[in-house]
Image (cartoon, helix red, strand yellow):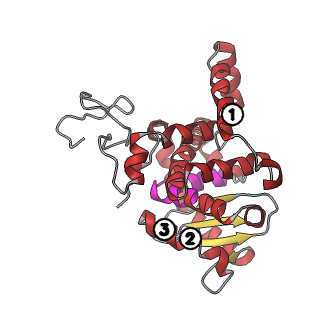
Amino acid sequence: MLSRYDFIHPEDAAAQEQLEAVPGCKLLVRKFLSVGAEQLQYGMNMASSIRLSETQLPDIYRHLPPICEKLGIAEPELYLTMNPVPNAWTFGDTRIAITLTSGLVESMTPEELDAVIAHECGHILLHHTLYLSIAWFLAGGIGFVDALGPLSEPIKLALYHWQRKAELSADRVSCLITSPEITTRTIARLAGGPMSITNQLNLEEWAQQAERYEEIRTDDKWNKALQILATAWLTHPFPAVRVREMLKWSGSDQYKQLLSGGSSKHRCPHCGAEITGEWKFCRFCGTSLVNTNC
C-alpha cells in the first residue's frame, strides 16, 4: 500500500509544521469547519457543475477509478465545470471533490489528463485537502479569515507558502502514476499553451531555467527579498521549478523503489524525507530517529 511518506517533499513537511505553528492556525481550521464550507461547495457543485460518473460523460470519468485504486484512496466526487482556462482543483475534508474545467479537458491528451487527475488524487493521499480548501476560499476572496484580525496576514502567508510546497509532493504522485515525461509535458502545456506550440519543447533545457532562477534567487540579499515578494502570494511554484524538482526526484532511489513496486525505505517516520543510516535526528524536521525502523 502506498503511503504519503513515499511522496512527501521535505519542504512540504517543513512548511506544514511552520503553518501549524503560526498563532491562530488551529482557530482558523475550527472556524473553517464551522461555517459549513463543504456543504456550501457541494450545493454549488450540484447547481452549477456536471458530476461525472459511469453514465455521465464516462470517457472523462473513467480516468479516475484506476488512479484511486493504484493509490489506495476512496474515490472522490468528480465534476466538470465550464471554464475556458485549463485548471483543476480539489476541495473538501470529509466530502472531497475534484473539479476539472472544460478548458483543461479540451486541451489535454488522455495521458496528460491522467497526470492532472493523479496530481489531484495525490493531494488526497497526502492529506492536503483541508488546508487546500481553506486556501481555495482565500483565493475566492471569502473573508472569514479576516475575522482573526492581526493574525490573518501571517496565516495567509504561511498557508500560501505551504501550498507551493504541497504542489511539489503532488507532482511526485503524478510522476509515479504516469511518468516524469508525461507529468512535465502536462505542466509545459499549462505553462506554454497547446500541443501545436509546446510539442517540441526541450524539457531538460526548460528545467535549466529553474537552475538559473535559483542562482538569481540566492544571488544577494536584494534579489532574495525581491523573489520573496514575488512569490509570497502565489499558490503554485513557478513551472520551471516544478519540472526541475520532478526530474531530480525521478532520478532518486526512492522513485526507483516505488516504480519497482516497493515502498521506499530509510525515510523519516514523521516528514518522509530520505535519511541515511547514521542520522540520529531528521535534518529536515528534527524528529528523533533513535529506536525507529528507519
Q: Which mark is residue 252?
A: none
- Residue 19, visible in the rendered structure: no
In this picture, residue 255 sits left or right of residue 165 = left
Location of residue 265 in the rendering, given as x and y in whole percent from the top left corner: 30, 45
The quarter of the picture where the C terminus appears is top left
Q: Which residue is mark 3?
A: 68
Which type of secondary structure does the marked residue at label 3 adopt? Answer: helix
Q: Whole-Å distance between the Cαs marked 2 and 1?
A: 32 Å
Q: Nearer the viewer, mark 1 or mark 3?
A: 1
Q: Earlier in the sequence, mark 1 or mark 3?
A: 3
**Is there a contact, CB below 8 Å, between mark 2 and mark 3?**
yes
Decide if residue 100 is on the left or right side of residue 115: right
Q: Residues within 10 Å of mark 2 (few under 14, many from 20)?
A: many
Q: Residue at x 67, y 59 (%)?
A: 88
Left or right, 274 with respect to 113, comes to left
What segment carries the magenta color?
Answer: 119-138
Residue at image point 32% right, 32% down: 282
Residue located beneath label 2 in the image: 64
Q: Is residue 171 visible?
A: yes
**Residue corresponding to mark 1:** 205
Instruction: Tell which residue pokes out farthest to the left in this image.
Output: 291
Task: Say whether marks 1 and 3 touch (CB < 8 Å).
Answer: no
| Residue 38 falls within the magenta-colored stretch | no
- Is most of the magenta stretch helix, strand or loop? helix
